[in-house]
Image (cartoon, rainbow, N blue to C red):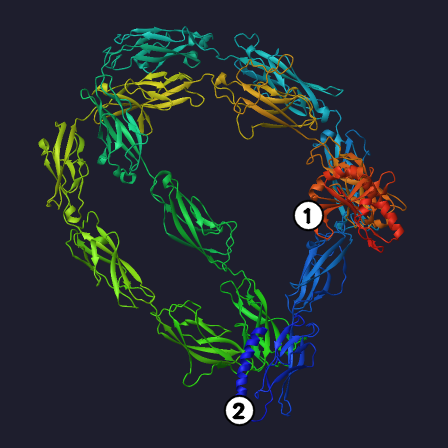
Amino acid sequence: MDVMSQDQSNMKILLAAICIGFISGTLGQANQPPRFIEDMDGFSVAENTAVGTRVYRLVGVDTDRDPITYGIEGTTVFRVDPTMGDVVLSEPLDREAQSSLTFYVTLEDLVGSGNPNNLVRHQVTVQIRDVNDNAPLFHGTPYVARVSEDTPVGSVVFGPFNITDRDVQGATLGVTCQPTQESPDACTVFRVEALRQESGLWQGNLVLLSGLDYEGERLYQLQLTASDAAQQSVVVVSIHVDDAQDTPPMFTSSLIGRVDEDVPPGTSVMRVEARDGDEGAPRELSYALVSNPGDYFSIDDSGLILTTKAINREDIVSGSVMLTVKATELVGGQQSPDDAASSEAEVVISVTDVNDVAPYFNRDVINVTIGEDIRDGTPLPDLDLVAKDEDTGINSVFDIVLEGGDGIFSVTPRIGTGATSVSVRVENASRLDFETLEDRVIVLQVVATERSTPQRFSASALLRVTVVDRNDNSPEFAEKSFEVYLPENSPSGSTVLVAAATDADSRSFGTEGIMYRLYGNGANRFHIDKRTAVVTTIACETPGSGRCLDFDGSESSFYLSLAATDDNGSGQTTVVPLTVYLTDVDDNSPRFVQSNYTGTIDEGSMQFDPPLVVKAEDRDSSSNVTYSIVGGNTDGIFGVDGASGLVSASRPERLDVARLNASRVSLLVQATDGATAADTAIVSVFVRDVNDRVPQFGRALYEAAVSETATAGTVVAQVGAIDSDSGPGGQVTYAIQAGGRGNFIIDPESGVISVSARAEFDYDRLRDYTLTVTAVDGGVPAQTGRAAVLVSVLDANNKSPEFRPAVQRVDVREDAPVGTVVHPLSAVDPDGGALLRYRLDGPTTGRTKNGDFIDDFPEAWFAVDGGTGDVRVVAPLDREVAARVELHVVATDLSAPVAQTGAGTLVVSLLDVNDKAPVFLPVLTVDHPFYTARVMEESAVGSFVTAVTASDVESGVGRFELTENPGGYFAIGETTGVISVAKRLDFESLPSSDFSLVVTAFDKGRPPLSSSVGVVVTVADVNDNGPTFERASYSSVIPENSLDNTYVAEVRATDPDTSGIVYALRGRSAASFYVDGDGVVRVRTGETLDREATPVMALQVVASDYENGGGARSSSVPLYVSLSDTNDNAPVFQRRAYHATVVENVPPESAIVQVSAGDADEGANADLRYAIVDAGELADKISIDPTSGSIRRSADLAGLAGRYEITVQARDGAGNGANTATVPLVLEIVDVNNRRPYFVTPESDNETVHLLENQSAGFVIVRVRARDDDDDSKIHYGLQMGDVVGNETKEFAIDSYTGELRTRVRLDREKQDTYQLDLVAQDGGNPPYQVHRFLLVVVDDVNDDVPEFPRNQETEPYVLAVKEHGSSNRVVGRLQAIDGDANNNAEIFYHIVSGDPDNIFSVDRNTGEILVHMTLDRETKSEYDFVVMATNNQAFQSINRLGKRTQNITYDKENLSLAQIHVTVEDINDNAPKFTQSLYYGGVKTAAQQGTSVARVQAIDNDLPADNGTVRYAIAAQSYVGDRAAPRVAFVVRPDGGVFTDLVTFEDYARGFFNVTIEARDAGNATYRDVATLLVYVYDESSAVKVVIANTPERVINDMENLKRALQNSTRNRVVIVDDVRYHVDTENNVVHEWTDVIVHFIDPRTNEVTSVPTVLRLVDTDKFYLKPKYEEYLVTKIEVTALTLKFTLKSLIFLLKSCLSYDTIKRIPLLYLNLVTIPHRTSVGH
């Protein structure tokens, strides 16, 4: 309780006490002693309370109303105001020194009148509450340990060590490991293990976490931090690692050797060296060979390897021998048996070759046969010739030459190595003509001769090439083409042409073997003699007409092909065109331009897109063509404009793909000129489905479940949706739109939902996911369907129970009997179905009532029920022994697969007994036994109702509670006693307007006592309700056209607040009705109700009250008035007139046409019947279905072809109504067609015609001709394309009247060399007949394609690789271009056309092989680029006679005849490393520890780093120049060139410097090496200078060399050594990250001594004006001493100032302390 609250409470108690005292004084005469009401006993105060704070107010009362005074005895910690009783803290508190105070408080009354005062003295105890004001304390510091490097992981390396915390408050102690700068990985090697962890005490060990290695790290320093959440302490632990014999020997020498193959046995080859890896006590070693292939070598104890026998290099496959050498440590002169005391290494000894084997061929004699038509560059077939030399290196290189052949052949390669395949190619094929060749067997000899050996051994192979004859000449005609004019009535057998050909070849290959044939469109009308080439007309009965040559009925010209083929018809062919022209006659009727038309229209649209127009042409200029649809127009959906031929939808509302059950409609359109026969065409209408349907899921809600431990990919559910649109509009894609929180994914095609890779389920955080899944179709615009997927997460037992809170507290009376349940423990397990068991764990601890800790608390007062968790008293309690007991409890989940536990603490406080209950004020009487209050209904929640007051003379009132609260409508303030509204008070719905509450007041005693009082709250009514209708809506049905005041409906509303209600009508139809005060609705006077205009009229009926209190309220309901129908509308036909066409032989009862009418009325009034009222001549031939309106044939229509007008009637009332309508119907009966056409040309199926590619568009291929025995003049020609017949494909077009088949484009044989056309001939009958014939068009090749290189990622550019320093004239790659032409037209030649100005490379013009002609050096140039062109031009030349490039064609990506070549030169190890400097400088502090950076050296190997350029560093020698001997090892060098200190005390070497020789070796070749010198100077802190730079450390490091040069110039060329680069620290010890401190020292190269700081600063000040621009360039702001501590006299100070400081610096120093002082010397730049 705070002091203010206590004051208010005490004031109330004091007033009550005065009243009681007054009454008591009136009744008795004896002076009574005063008594305490609040005496401070049991009060507690925090130990950090400030001195002077008022902490308490003593309260006393005297019944005699005498003045009273307060006092304190027995302590000086508190003082009290004698009048007011205010207690003030007068001395600081420390709970750790004293946890409680016991003293006396006094109360004395001033009786007066000579009577003695009454003095009351109470002993009180005040508890001092703990605050967390003490840091944890490490015991037994410092912490230092030593451990052997072979200590097992898990061992304790230090401990146990203890940490205590005197505080009670604060979190449980925790200890963490933190690495230090010296040992950044220490906390990964060691870990902290807690042994005991409780309030105020932590005990633990330091345990080894990973293996130790003396050779790698010898000292670890880590920092332990102990924390209680608010306070922490730090201690550093040093762990020294001792060496153990655990490191095997390490090989230190080169492991690569070389020996000639002809050396004698016993020759020394190489020596291997190793050392013991344990540096602490190294052992001697012995050597042995573990593996020795071929037993060529041996090894002695010193590691010397010698040969044991003669070596033949050719017997060794790889040219080298790999030995395994074992080095073993010696113990007492004997080899150690320990496996860890030996090491093995692979030693490679290369055997150098000598030239002792001659070259040889795999075959001695080879016979080859070739044809005379072989091409240049072609290798001889089946050669399989290989030249070999089993020597290696230069001894295996040989030249290959070809002898004989007189230059017709060439050999490749010209130079061979080892085993080389030899290829002989044709170089001059023109000289291999069988007819002119004198000797048809050519003898060649291939010779291989060693190239660079003294012996020049050689070998040869004999090659016989036989040339055979080929048919290489084609027949030749005297003319390139022939034209003949022939009368159409020429008699049978008339000679058309005599055209013989000749052939230069002999025998059957020549003229005597030629055979002729004639083909093409119409070739069947002529005959050709196969041997003489005489062409004549075929036999025909009626020349000039019928099936004979007839200009009017067939082709007017014939485009034929005349072919001559040698070798008796199976050899080479020559074709020439032959054209035969006839005469012309003209007599035509209308003909459609196309026999088939195609159009596309959207559902529900009137016009086609693009517009669809049919067109017929009539060669008679006086004819007028009209159009009509004569077939296929179901339901009359389509129409055609008679004049223009524009086709459109006349009934678009019936144009629906689903209704038609098809997306294609075929119409038959007729064209006529009114005189001659009509022509028809087929119109194929494609109805385009509009994407108007939304995908529908199978269910609106899917349900599924997933385990909270489910892994990625687990299938959860599958959804499915269907879209009834067609095409892409019916194809759906699934996606999760929302709700998944990234835990689910869905397959877009199958709809399978599965667990995502980043899913994290937790049943206890979220148990359900509601996914919104979408299905989107592929239409335009796209439609989207949605469904919900409810995924329930299934619980898994994967969490441990835990107490909430972890520390639970309970109070118990000290007189509680044995068996009393003190507290029900309750642990929470987030998993479902957990089976928890409880137990006590560990020692029970206790504290006295003064707060003192009981070390070994012996009392077992409590026990816990394992099943329920109830903690019971099991022994009598004694508060004098312990006032607080702490129990450590554990909850275990037995249902888990592995037992899961949670720990907590139960703190039990023992309480004194409380025996006085609170008293309510004012005191109630018999007449007024309860309190009363009043509140208005609908008062806001929290509104004040009343307040009750109570007092307790013992412990004060602790809280108030509503122990009876019917309906829970009210609440009470726990400390204030204020009663307020808890939930809505609705007078009309309350069970009563009066509520009887019971308020109970509890005191602060332990256990608390209580008193209760009744409070009656009355709720007052307000007008807060509106009228309520008896029904949610009303409806009524009345006839349309009802009379005025016709009854419609009656509505009724009630209001619990009032009975006065007014009604009104609202809405668009309200004007047609009115409502009276009783809620009766009627038709308003003068209103006409029309059902056809508005079948249902919606009104709003509004009811309003008119109460004054709270304002009027209203409500409304809908009233729906439905109008019933009367027969007041006549039928209406859907069309003004109908038109139908029917053939005369239509079957009986076939439907002809259907008429349809509608009626705006409904029911029987709209039930229509149809009848034919006027049919003329067809009265008994046709009938109509009275219900459907379908007109059918009822009698034979044969012979009745013509046009008829018919009148049809529709009547309502099921044919009995008063209303009728009529419509005209025009019916056309047409004749039928019963003969099919047949083809004349081509005369058979799959006939073949040839034409050359690249013929110009419009070239006539053939004239198609067909006959019809009904009427030839009505035949139309077309091409079948899928389901459509048209006159044009992409490549061909056919004239629908003449049948001429022409090309539409230039044909390209390389894209397509054959076409199969489906020719169509259709007659003009009704119905029309079609016949088909297939024609094969073969496209013959011409040379129209250029060679092209493929374009892809691998050829853009072509990337080739060649090793540097290889032999010349090597093949490095091969190109291959593609030519789409055939035969000779596809021959390709290759040339380099740009790049390669030095002719380093060449390309074989025939094969595309790329060769390199000289030795390449990667370090000189690593890449080459040039361009190669592929061409058909055999005469193309890219190099002239002088070897100069004559072409310079730059690469163009769009020109596929060009290839860009990129040659990469691969690296070999041919360069030694080279240091960047021959002399380096470094510095080391006298206090430097092991591992301190000294300097960094760098050597560069120009070879590629990853392969051959790896550099390894080693210290070759190190010496000390000074007054003592050098240590054995002072420095080590790391792989990156960093030089670091070893275990040396550099303070002993402060008077000299070290000279270190560093060696850089090539990792791949130890003979490649370089050395450099490093001079290391030892200095102390006083020798260093700090350079402050206004720039970041990163940028300073990047520009460090320039900065060092500037400092070198400012100090007379002294050597600048940088010791450290770090963030700047200003004069207030703030770290400035934008500035940098560079710590440097300077070396005088003349004396090799460290230059003193005063000298450096003097040099800097001397040249500061000269150096100012340089310092500004590098942002140097000042140069100062790092720390210079001196003791001096005034005289020495003046000398120092004159020596070290400039005048400007001196005058800025305001005060000098002539004592032990630190002087920071600065040189400020720019001031």
Where disc 1 sits, the SS reads strand
Q: Quadrant of residue 1223?
A: top left
* Extreme-front residue of the structure: 113
Q: Is residue 453 above or below residue 741?
A: above
Say few, some or many: other residues with alpha carbon within 10 Å of mark 2 (under 14 / 14 to 19 / 20 or more). Answer: few
Would residue 899 be found to the left or right of residue 1583 on screen?
left
- Residue receiving disc 2: 26
Q: Quadrant of residue 77?
A: bottom right
x%, y% of residue 968?
42, 71
Between 1438 and 564, the one lying in front of the other is 1438
Q: If the image is split into quadrants, where does the N terminus sit?
A: bottom right
- Residue receiving disc 1: 1633
Q: Does residue 173 appear in the picture of this structure?
A: yes
x%, y% of residue 693?
34, 43
Where disc 2 sits, the SS reads helix
Between 1726 and 723, the one lying in front of the other is 1726
Residue type (three-letter) at the residue carrying disc 2: Thr
